[in-house]
Amino acid sequence: MNIKRDISSQGAHPENAPDEAETAAAWMNGMVARSAPPVPPNAAAAREAVTDLLTSRSCGQGAEPADVVVADALLVTSELVTNAFRHGGGLTGFAAELSDEGLRIAVADASPRHPVVQERGDAGAAQIGAYGGRLATNISIAFHPGGKHITALVPLT
């Protein structure tokens, strides 16, 4: 399957953060306000929050997502959260939301550094992270004072 991958970086570094970063921060802050706990203490807790979200969706529609779809969503969640802890100076925010497009996951970390982007052998697509970066159709980075927000969209079909 050939999925268009759109990796974009919004803004310069925190000292010159643009309106796009503020928009990403506002979305994440709105999502965090509705979720509990706002910042998971580890990747396992983030995966549990995403599992609960996916389960609530299936209960409302009467159909459970396929196991591979759930596994993909949990892998992307794990990689984003783990990278924030390992390379981003700590996880400072987490949000997950379901839409018609799929599962949107956002993490915030304390590092002003841009994530490492690697060129992959498959069609030369730029990737952030390992396998999780291949599963997301859109990944965006927005810098803000004190760090950055990374959002990823994972299709659920």
Image: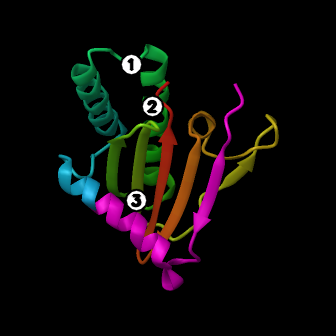
Q: Residue at x 36, y 39 (%)?
A: 43
**Label 3 is placed on what type of residue?**
Ala
Q: Residue at x 39, y 19 (%)?
A: 65
Q: Is residue 133 magenta?
A: no
Q: Nearer the viewer, residue 63 or 91?
A: 63
Q: For the residues labelled 2 and 1, say whether their Cβ atoms are less than 8 Å apart.
A: yes
- Looking at the picture, does residue 121 appear above or below residue 26? above
- Looking at the picture, does residue 150 appear above or below residue 54? below
Mark-to-mark CA distance, 1 and 3: 27 Å
Q: Which residue is mark 2?
A: 73
The local crowd at label 1, few if under 14, some if 14 to 19, many if 20 or more residues have their Cα within 10 Å, is some
Q: For the residues labelled 1 and 3, say whether their Cβ atoms are less than 8 Å apart.
A: no
Mark-to-mark CA distance, 2 and 1: 11 Å
Q: State which tag comes first along the sequence, 2 or 1.
A: 1
**Label 1 is placed on what type of residue?**
Pro
Determine whether the residue tagged by mark 1 lies in a helix, strand or loop. loop
